[in-house]
Image: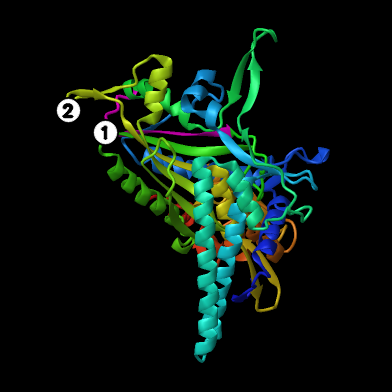
């Protein structure tokens, strides 16, 4: 067994950390570039043996908390293909666009809004560095240095406010000439060419279109859904009637969505094919802001229940609201590349149901037996990207530790309830009946836990392999097992070991891996 940790290895910077996470994810079977043998496909990824398990566990954890733990929330699984009028009614055909800009020298295309957001993030990073330096620098207190540092921070914040104001005005008015001018004034350069030779900003629709029909001339244009929410809205009455739901109630769904992101980047943070976990909560008109506050608090508690740490999350309340919303906030996570949106909570009013009512000619109203009236319900939406949640967990979990013998232990400290492999069963040596006994224990546990058996290499190396894939517990069969029917249970994060009875292994693991959903 390795000795206890004496210090954490400090990463050189966040870029290096992010590169290590990406490399680790591939090396240990979490995420592979799609179609890699053909040089890959931009912004598309495949989930490997451990990646698909982690993804399934996140999805199941969300589903249990959202559907199983609520009497008034039910689930559906709507089709990816829907009638084209769905997307006309929702506004996606006319308004689901990104402002794009090209660099004439590199021939690369960028989202203009993302260029400005990256600029703002760099200023925010500078402020954080100044604050971090200041906390270490003023001992003993140096008033002059304090004033200089404080002055720089105030200048950075003033600059951020100015840019934010101009940026918000451009986006709200859809004034792409002013947006380009902002990029020029900020002297933002192309990351590839380093030049500022920009084209005008123009709009680009993000939906993937294809043809559905037996002959080309008679084919209809259909779209790969850019979000899962519309499948919930068009099934509102079907679900309400068949599940006998009363307002307030929710409909949950997980599934794939597709967006033709020109500037897909930051690994799996922004992809062309991704998965969402959404819940639309239908309420009485007038009650929506109360429920908005409820779900705002409920969702942050869900994230914190994983034990990742509340300092990794923050709210970002929207000042500029979508035309259909009267309240909106994001739960942001501190990724290696800064705080970015992880989940959105929106009060969508009655926009969606009314839009489908208008375009379909079918009533989307609910008769409320308590008030004896019919109305179109208002909606509170909670929407989280499964892939982003995956990246958040992986980013926080990746740890390099320096041990007493100066060796480096790389470990994924994934919350045990989400870990791809829950327990590894290891014979100390590959003889003396230990492999046979270990397989007996494996067979005992496999029905209830995702397990792994490993007998290759020294036990220390096998522990390191399990640390690297994030396995929270290892069970080791040794000579003492045959003397008193006990095994060693090793915990991943602390590396502490204890002897437990073979007869108690299953109950012990149930307790250690129990869902603690809030």
Mark number, residue 284: 1
- Residue range in magenta is 243-257
* Residue 256 located left or right of residue 239: right
Which element carries disc 1, helix, strand or loop? loop
Image location (x, y in percent) of residue 105: 80, 47
Toward which corner of the image does residue 129 lie, by quadrant? bottom right
Image location (x, y in percent) of residue 22: 69, 54
Mark number, residue 499: none
Report if the CB atoms under discs 2 and 1 are less than 8 Å apart. Answer: yes
Q: CA distance from mark 2 to mark 1?
A: 10 Å
Residue in the image at 64% along x and 64% along y: 14
Image location (x, y in percent) of residue 195: 76, 54
Q: Is residue 400 above or below residue 426?
A: below
Q: Main secondary structure of the magenta part?
A: strand
**Which residue occupies the foreground of this view, 402 or 151?**
151
* Residue 146 located left or right of residue 299: right
Q: Residue reaching furthest right?
A: 38
Toward which corner of the image does residue 12 lie, by quadrant? bottom right
Q: Is residue 480 above or below residue 185?
A: below
Q: Which residue is mark 2?
A: 371
Image location (x, y in percent) of residue 490: 56, 64
Mark 2 neighbour density, 10 Å: few (under 14) some (14–19) many (20 or more): few
**Which residue occupies the foreground of this view, 209 or 24?**
209
Mark 1 neighbour density, 10 Å: few (under 14) some (14–19) many (20 or more): some
Residue in the image at 32% along x and 33% along y: 378
User: Which image quarter holds the N terminus?
Assistant: bottom right
**Which residue occupies the foreground of this view, 352 or 280?**
352
Residue 255 is one of the magenta-drawn residues? yes
Asked if residue 269 can be seen in this view, the reply is no
* Numbered disc total: 2
Residue in the image at 20% along x and 23% along y: 373
């Amino acid at each position: 067994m390795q000795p206890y940790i004496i210090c954490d290895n400090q990463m050189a910077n966040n870029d290096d950390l992010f590169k290590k996470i990406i490399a680790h994810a591939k090396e240990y079977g979490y995420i592979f570039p799609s179609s890699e043998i053909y040089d890959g496909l931009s912004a598309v990824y495949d989930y490997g043996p451990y990646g698909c398990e982690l993804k399934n566990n996140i999805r199941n954890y969300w589903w249990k908390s959202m559907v199983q733990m609520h009497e008034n929330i039910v689930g559906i699984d709507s089709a990816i293909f829907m009638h084209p009028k769905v997307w006309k009614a929702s506004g996606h055909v006319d308004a689901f666009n990104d402002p794009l800009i090209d660099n004439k020298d590199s021939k690369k295309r960028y989202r203009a809004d993302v260029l400005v957001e990256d600029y703002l993030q760099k200023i925010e990073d500078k402020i954080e560095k100044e604050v971090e330096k200041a906390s270490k620098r003023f001992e003993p207190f140096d008033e002059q240095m304090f004033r200089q540092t404080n002055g720089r921070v105030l200048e950075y914040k003033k600059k951020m406010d100015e840019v934010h104001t101009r940026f918000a005005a451009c986006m709200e008015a859809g004034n792409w000439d002013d947006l380009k001018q902002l990029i020029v004034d900020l002297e933002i350069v192309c990351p590839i060419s380093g030049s500022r030779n920009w084209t005008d900003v123009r709009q680009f629709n993000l939906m993937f279109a294809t043809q559905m029909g037996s002959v080309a001339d008679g084919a209809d244009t259909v779209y790969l859904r850019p979000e899962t929410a519309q499948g919930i809205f068009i099934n509102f009455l079907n679900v309400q009637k068949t599940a006998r739901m009363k307002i307030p109630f929710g409909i949950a769904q997980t599934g794939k969505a597709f967006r033709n992101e020109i500037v897909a980047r930051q690994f799996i943070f922004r992809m062309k094919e991704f998965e969402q976990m959404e819940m639309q909560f239908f309420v009485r008109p007038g009650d929506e802001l109360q429920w908005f506050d409820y779900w705002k608090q409920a969702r942050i508690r869900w994230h914190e229940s994983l034990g990742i740490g509340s300092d990794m999350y923050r709210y970002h309340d929207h000042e500029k609201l979508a035309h259909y919303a009267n309240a909106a906030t994001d739960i942001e996570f501190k990724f290696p590349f800064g705080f970015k949106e992880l989940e959105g909570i929106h009060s969508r009013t009655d926009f969606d149901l009314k839009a489908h009512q208008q375009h379909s000619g079918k009533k989307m109203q609910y008769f409320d037996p308590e008030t004896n009236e019919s109305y179109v319900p208002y909606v509170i939406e909670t929407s989280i990207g499964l892939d982003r949640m995956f990246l958040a967990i992986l980013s926080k979990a990746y740890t390099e530790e320096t041990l007493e013998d100066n060796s480096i232990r790389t470990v994924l400290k994934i919350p045990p309830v989400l870990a791809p492999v829950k327990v590894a069963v290891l014979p100390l040596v590959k003889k003396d009946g230990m492999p046979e006994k270990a397989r007996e224990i494996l067979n005992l546990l496999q029905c209830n836990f995702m397990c792994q058996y490993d007998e290759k290499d020294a036990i220390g190396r096998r522990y390191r392999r399990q640390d690297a894939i994030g396995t929270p517990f290892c069970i080791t069969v040794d000579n003492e097992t045959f003397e008193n029917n006990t095994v060693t249970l090793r915990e991943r994060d602390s590396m502490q070991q204890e002897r437990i009875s073979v007869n108690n292994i299953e109950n012990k693991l149930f307790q250690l891996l129990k869902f603690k959903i809030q």
